[in-house]
Image (spheres, rainbow, N blue to C red):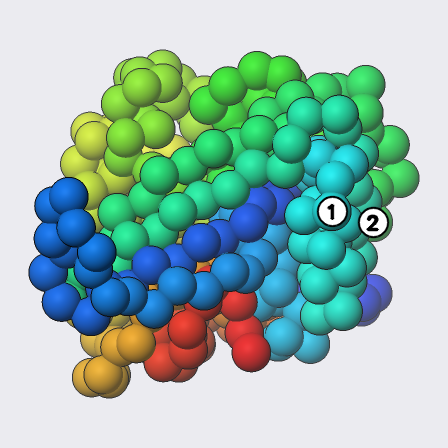
Amino acid sequence: MRYALRRYSRQVLIVSIGDLLLDIAIVPEGQLQPDDDSPATITLGGGGQAANFCAWTASLGDPARLVARVGDDETGRRLVADLEGRGVEVRAVWAPEPTGAIAVLVDQDGRRTMATYRGASVGLSPDDLDEDWFRDARLLHVPAYSLFVEPIAGAARAAIRSVRDSKGMLAIDLSSAAGLRGYGPSRMAYVLARLKPEVLFATEVEAATLAVPLDSLAQVPVLKLGRQGCRVFGRTIPAPEVQAIDPTGAGDAFAAAFCSAWLRGATPVESAEQAVQAASRSVLLAGARPS
C-alpha cells in the first residue's frame, strides 16, 4: 500500500474550488409522455459538485471553504446565502454572467440524466484568487469539472500550487465520464500524473474511461461502486441496503466523509467505511445537500 497518514494539531480546514449552481431536480411519477404533460415532482436547490462537497463537509463538523465564481444575480446571491447558512465559508467572485444551473432528471430506477449550464463558474481565473484563501487549507478538493476548461482550470492549478506550498494535500474527483471523453482521457491521465493527488475518487465508468490504473496516479485511489459501496486497495466495502429517494449528491457526501475521516487520522479503509455510510444516508434525502 502506498499512502501517507498525517495528523494535524491545528483545526482541519477543507477547501474546494469549482461550481456553485442551481439544481432543478425532476422526478416523474411515471413514464414521460412525448409532446404531452407528465406529472412530476420538481424541486429547486443548491448544486455544483464543489459546493455540495463543502455543504456535506460542514455538516460533518469540519470547517469548509468554497471558492467559486457566481453570477451577480438573485439566484447567485440566494445560493451563496444558503451555503453560508449551512456553515460554509464562501469566497465568491461575483460575475456579470448568469449563475449556472443543472437540470437533473431522475428515472424510476433512481438513475440520473443531467443537463448542465455552468454559467459564470467557468470564468474563474487565477487573477481572481487570493492566496490567503488556500494558505490555511489542510486539503484542497478539486472536481475534475474545474480542470476541463479554461480559465477555471488555470485557477484550479494556481490553487493547487498555493496549497502545496503550504504543505496541504490534494483530493481530485474525476466528476464525469462525458467530461473526461471531451477533455481526452490520456490528457487527463497526464495531468493527474503531474498533480500527484493524495486521494483520487472515480466511479467505475470514469475509471474505465480514463483507462489508466488509478493506483498509478494517486496514493489513495478510491473506486466508487454506487449501491455496491466502494473499493480501496483491492478491498470492497459494501454499502447497506436502503430504499433510495434521490441519489443526487451521494458521491459528494461520500467524498466529504472520506476526506474528513482521513484527515483526522483514519486509515483509507476506515475512511471508506465512513464514506459509504454517509453516501447511504444521503440518498434518503431529496436534493444534493444535507437537510
Image position of 72 with respect to 111: above or below: above
Crowding at label 1, few (<14), some or many (≥20) Cα neighbours within 10 Å? few
Query: In what quadrant of the picture does the C terminus appear?
Result: bottom right
- Marking on residue 74: 1
- Of 17 and 97, which appears nearest the observer? 97
Q: Amino acid at mark 2?
A: Asp
- Which secondary structure lies at badge 1? helix
Q: Amino acid at mark 1?
A: Glu
Residue plotted at (20% across, 47% down): 204
Q: Is residue 267 left or right of residue 265?
A: left
Mark 1 vs mark 2, foreground winner is 1
Q: Is residue 69 visible?
A: yes
In percent of width and height, residue 272 lies at 39, 68
- Which secondary structure lies at badge 2? loop
Q: Is residue 39 left or right of residue 179?
A: left
Image quarter of residue 184: top left
Q: Is residue 269 left or right of residue 111?
A: right
- Marking on residue 231: none
Image position of 191 with respect to 7: above or below: above
In percent of width and height, residue 148 lies at 46, 23
Crowding at label 2, few (<14), some or many (≥20) Cα neighbours within 10 Å? some
Image quarter of residue 281: bottom left
In percent of width and height, residue 178 lies at 28, 30
In percent of width and height, residue 33 lies at 11, 53
Q: Which residue was labeled with disc 2?
A: 136
- Of 96 and 236, which appears nearest the observer? 96
Residue plotted at (77% across, 36% down): 72
Residue plotted at (77% across, 59% down): 81
